[in-house]
Image (cartoon, rainbow, N blue to C red):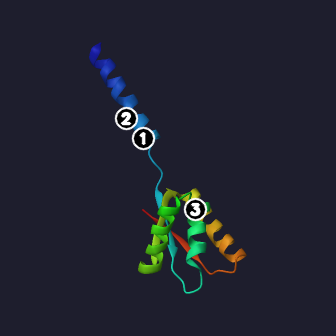
Amino acid sequence: MASTDTNTKEEILSKSEKDTAHPPMYKVILHNDDYTTMEFVVDVLIKIFGKSLEKANEIMLNVHRKGRGLCGIYTREIAETKVDTVHKLAKEHGYPLKSTMEKE
């Protein structure tokens, strides 16, 4: 009887692991341009991505120096919303700031 209980527990655990598989994650990236101010990028990172001022400045410098900066890693729906929000806010302020998402 003990072996049957063990087999049942293993089947349940195996099924639970399959049911709780993690969704694919996506990186949200900001891209450098010649017009968007550093201050606006920092503001976006704080308001949209919830970064501290120190972390926002670090990411902004990556965007400025390396051409792109990682803002965060999210599920697809959240990443899409973040990208759309960046574009909307940038457009409202007259900036061409570009944000993209990449599958991790």
The percent position of residue 56, horizontal first and vertical second, equals 51, 65
Instruction: Decide which of 8, 66 is in the foreground and name it.
Output: 66
What type is the residue that disc 2 sits on? Ser
The percent position of residue 13, horizontal first and vertical second, equals 38, 31
The percent position of residue 48, horizontal first and vertical second, equals 60, 61
Mark number, residue 14: 2
Question: Is 90 left or right of 16, judged from the image as shown?
Answer: right
For disc 3, the marked residue is: 46
Q: Are marks 2 and 1 in contact (CB under 8 Å)?
A: yes
The CA distance from mark 1 to mark 3 is 36 Å
The percent position of residue 86, horizontal first and vertical second, equals 62, 69
72 to 3, vertically: above or below: below
The CA distance from mark 2 to mark 3 is 41 Å
- Classed neighbour count for the residue bearing mark 1: other residues with Cα under 10 Å, few (<14), some (14–19), many (≥20): few
- Residue 48 appears in the rendering: no
Question: Is 64 left or right of 38, judged from the image as shown?
Answer: left
Mark number, residue 18: 1
Is label 2 in a helix, a strand or a loop? Answer: helix
Instruction: Decide which of 60, 90 is in the foreground and name it.
Output: 60
Q: Are marks 1 and 3 in contact (CB under 8 Å)?
A: no
The CA distance from mark 2 to mark 1 is 7 Å
Mark 1 / mark 3, whichever is N-terminal: 1
Residue lying at the far front in this picture: please name it. 54
Residue drawn at 60 percent across, 63 percent down:
82
